[in-house]
Structure formats: structure tokens, C-alpha cells
Image: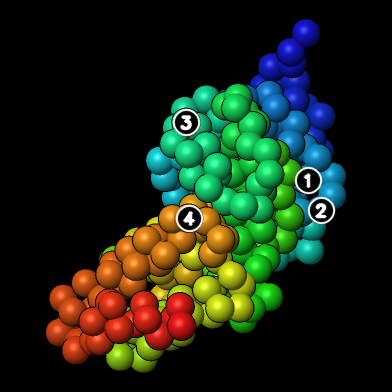
Amino acid sequence: MEEDFESILSKIDRRKVERLEKDSEIYKIMARVFDTSTLLTLYRLINRGVFDVFYGNISAGKEANIYCALDKNGNFVAAKIYRIATSDFKNMRRYLVGDTRFKRVPEDRRGVVYAWTSREFKNLQQAHEAGVPVPRPIDYEKNVLAMEFIGEDGVPYPLMKDVAPENPRKTFDVLIDSVKKLYQEAEIVHSDLSEYNVMLTPDPVLIDFSMGTDIKNPMAEQLLMRDIQNLVRYFKKLGLKTPEPSEIFAEIVR
């Protein structure tokens, strides 16, 4: 018999539950959005020390919610939780099929979401190891991903879509260098890079690698060009003179 939200929470250290219950809105959201499997996954990650206390929802995208949390040492971490019931798993699967790192892609909704989560963790690992400015991946299980929190005192740094960079030329150069490192050293393409997926610290940090794919994907070059075009478009709006996307593309894939 499947356990309900209350019984799962009762298994988690009462101190943690009581902190969660201090904010009734967070409690209601957790009860409404997350199924039993997700709660059990959080329970296991809490037991591993990855999470200790959950705070508010800091971002809600089409497929996932991101929460601010603390680990067992009191450090802020970001918890990205993919919603299983409302995910567009057919579209997710379409992008997974072209990624040669996945020899066999699940066909069921839950399996696709789990594979999607593991891919984002893998992408962050490869990017981080290549020296690309991304959130450091910490751990993952099923549809839950833990990574470095990009912000201060539980407040995330702004997205580039909301705050223009102080030094557009420097930021543009760092971003193009990051795209180049991703392709040449990490051997992946972000595939969804724009001002919506760059945080400013004030230096740029690339986020949301869920659509990142390996460079052997037949669509990799098309997706790379789209990333470059998005960046050029944004910085041209700021009045920055940039090379043409085709020139940048040729320099990266040479």
C-alpha cells in the first residue's frame, strides 16, 4: 500500500519536518507537487547528508522546481526536482534518443524523467571538469539533483535576462570561451543557452544543462549554432559589436 505525504515526512527527522512546517505554503506545495516516490528519494538524500533542511522554492520551470536547501554541514545547496506527473516526457525522450551516451532510452514517463535527471548531472560533471563556470554537481537520485547554490545567504544571483552585465565585452568573451570549452574539452553542447540560463555573480555562470548533449549527436552542430546565435542576439541588443555567429561557430568546431 502506497504511503501518504504525512507518513513519509514522519520518517524524516522531526526537526527537519518542523522547520518545513514553519512555512505552511512550502508544506502545501510539497504535498501537492511531489509524489511518494519523490519524497522517498528526498528521504534517502537526507540520510546521505546531501540535504538537511529545505527552504523556499526559488525557481519553477516547465519541467522542474528548484529549492534552496542546506546540507548536513550547513552549506547552501540547490535541489532541482523534476516533476514526474506534469513533465513533457515525450519531448524529453526525443532529445535523449539523439544522445549517444544513452544506448537504451526508456519509454515510460518515470524512466525518461530519471534518465533526464542523470543526463543533467553527467553534463554538469563534464562541464565542471573542463573548467566551465557551472554549478558544481553534488549528487542525484531518480528525479532529484543536488548542486552548488549560486548565490549568497540563500539568495540566488540574478539571471542575465533580468540584469545586464556590468562589462558586456568581458562577459561575452567568457561565455564564448565557455561554449568553446564545452565543445572541445567537455565534448557537449549546452543546447539551450541564452540570457535565461546565465547567472551573473557578476561573472557569468552557465546553468540548466538538462538539454545538454554530446557532440556526436547528429543535431549537435545545429544546437551549437543556436546557442551562439542566442548569445550574439542578446549582446547586440546591448550595443556590443560581435563577430558573426558563423565565424564563432567555425572557430569552435575547427
Residue occupied by mark 1: 46
Of tags 3 and 4, the one toward the viewer is: 4
Question: Which x, y percent locates residue 96?
Answer: 55, 44
Label 2 SS: loop
**Of 93 and 166, which appears nearest the observer?**
93
Q: Amino acid at mark 2?
A: Gly
**Of 139 and 221, which appears nearest the observer?**
221
Q: Which residue lies at the image location 23% right of the left edge and 86% below the top edge?
A: 242
Numbered circle sitting on residue 91? none
Residue occupied by mark 4: 218
Left or right: 181 as drawn, with respect to 126: left
Left or right: 239 as drawn, with respect to 82: left
Residue occupied by mark 2: 49
Residue furthest to the top:
1
Label 3 SS: helix
Residue occupied by mark 3: 90
Q: Which residue lies at the image location 30% right of the left edge and 84% below the top edge?
A: 247
Left or right: 210 as drawn, with respect to 169: right
Q: CA distance from mark 3 to mark 2?
A: 33 Å
Question: Which x, y percent locates residue 32?
Answer: 52, 25
Q: Amino acid at mark 3?
A: Lys
Residue 17 visible in the current orientation: no
Question: Which x, y percent locates residue 141?
Answer: 73, 44
Residue furthest to the right:
47
N-terminal of the pair, mark 3 or mark 2, is 2
